[in-house]
Image (cartoon, grey):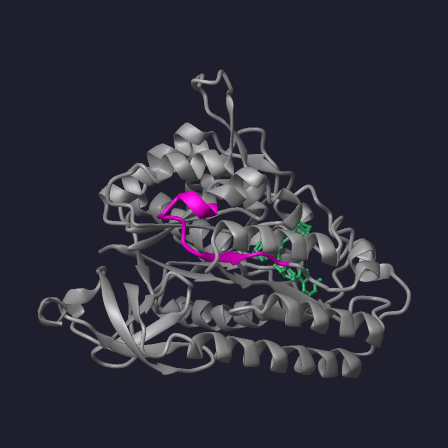
Amino acid sequence: MAKKLYIKTYGCQMNVYDSERMVDLLKPLGYQVTDEPAEADIALLNTCHIREKAEQKVYSDLGRLRQHQNLRQKQGKSLFIGVGGCVAQAEGEEILKQAPYVSMVFGPQTYHRLPEMIAKIVRQHEGRLPQAGRGIVDTEFPFESKFDALPVPETTNVSAFLSIQEGCDKFCTYCVVPYTRGIEYSRPAKDILAEAKKLVELGAKEITLLGQNVNAYHGQAAFLSNHGSTEWNLARLLRELATLPGLERLRYTTSHPDDMDQDLMDAHGDVPQLMPFLHLPVQSGSDRILQAMNRKHTAKDYLKIIERLRQSRPDIAFSSDFIVGFPGETNEDHQATLKLVQEVVYSQAYSFKYSIRPGTPAGSMDLQVPETVKTERLHELQALLNQQQLAFNQQFLGTLQPVLFDRIGKEEGQLLGKTPYMQSVPVTASKRLFGQLMNVIIKGAHANSITGEVVTEIRKHTA
Ligand code: SAH
Ligand code: SF4
Ligand code: F3S
């Protein structure tokens, strides 16, 4: 009987990509994915450390897995538990102290060693149960790149993720990523092109290039280009990917304003596959706070970039991340953030209360903002962002939008897709249309989605 693997993913898309690769790694060992932790032989939590809440969730989920482990023990079976991702990287041994029933702790840069870790754990126990104090911790930042050890993908979603860059050297004072993911690293362009080609052959119509600072991409081409340059930037990579037949849509995330070069902004104007949507986090609209955050850009710099991108691609829609209640943030700073939001006009955005992260410079700054003030500011900011999002969606009423159906909806007979502008579109449609790019006439607009009807080919011809 096939062995079962349960895997839960927290955090950003990089973790989603990593989890998919873990599945690929364990498939040759006979592990099949299950959604039921109760029937799993191995359970992996791919964790996120970005805010305190994300971290706490891991420990409560571990408690639940412990119960499944106990139950399986009574049935004479075992459940080996592994904790990967950014909490694992940040806490290492500490996880084994708090949860001694965990067998493996591994970081975002060592998960390619999972097959060896699992073999070792299984051998150690020879079918017996996980024993306290015998867990493996591997949170190294190895010299070899995990990408070289990962297998070629065998399956894909219609909308696929492809990690091209990892880590971060920016050290924003609030953020754990440079510590959990390590220094910035760009994969060689030829490896990315080969993986993209494979994904398209397997049926991907949309590829989202991923990186914590994806627009800082500077990969070795590994061969000399016409201009003699051996290094590619993101614009060059996007242009090359756009030549892949069958690849209809390209996206990239997450970008930093400081790495938004002219070449990349131009690509938004002349690469038709590059979708008119950009997630470009600004964090705050106050220069004083931006400086304390070590963001190295002002609100004005950011607005200039937005303007230049709009010159390149007039219909481009923007999204951002915001942090409210950073240490020392006054009401005046907060008002500056609201003002920036009003100037940009976003199509969607994420906003968070500042969360103290141990070991980061901002964690020990004076003038931490009281929780009640953070809550108030978050509500105010979110009200404005929601209003903008709804207004953005309402503009689409009555228009025809190309929608790529990349998911099956929760309700019976429902498909979910995305417009070029990243709006979610749930519609009632035949499963036959799953994976297709279809025109949808928009008839409803809500804060988080737009809805409508698929315009069939027949209607298109008779219209
Ligand atoms: N590399 C990306 C995003 C990294 S993390 C960037 O620089 O934009 C995703 C988001 O989490 C950040 O943009 C930030 O808004 C938020 N975040 C990071 N650390 C945080 C903290 N300590 N408290 C609250 N939000 C945080
Ligand atoms: Fe974190 Fe800043 Fe790096 Fe983004 S750029 S990952 S917020 S340190
Ligand atoms: Fe979280 Fe790590 Fe991503 S901290 S946001 S999973 S890089």
| In the rendered image, the vertical position of residue 425 relative to residue 211, given as above or below | below
359 to the left or right of 19: right
- Residue extending farthest right: 366
Q: Position of residue 433 (x, y in %)?
A: 18, 66
Q: Can I make out residue 369 in this image?
A: no
Q: Residue at x 49, y 33 (%)?
A: 187
Q: Residue at x 30, y 55 (%)?
A: 157
Left or right, 143 with reference to 238: right
Number of disc labels? 0
Q: Give the quarter of the figure containing the C terminus.
A: bottom left
**Quarter of the image holding residue 170?**
top right
- Which residue is depicted at the point 77% across and 59% down? 358
Quadrant observed for ligand 3 in the rendered image: bottom right
In this view, the residue in front, 232 or 336, is: 336
Q: As drawn, is 89 to the left or to the right of 335?
A: left
In magenta stretch: residue 386: no
Horizontal and vertical percent for residue 415? 26, 72
Give the quarter of the image for residue 292.
Answer: bottom right
Quadrant containing the N terminus in the rendered view: bottom left
The picture places residue 297, in percent across and down from the top left corner, at 74, 51
Q: Which residues are magenta?
A: 268-281
Residue 63 position, x and y percent, is 55, 71
Q: Is residue 278 magenta?
A: yes
Does residue 303 sit above or below 69 in this rendering?
A: above
| Looking at the image, residue 1 lies above or below residue 338 | above
Q: Residue at x 73, y 47 (%)?
A: 171
| Residue 439 visible from this viewpoint | yes
Q: Nearer the viewer, residue 205 or 101?
A: 205
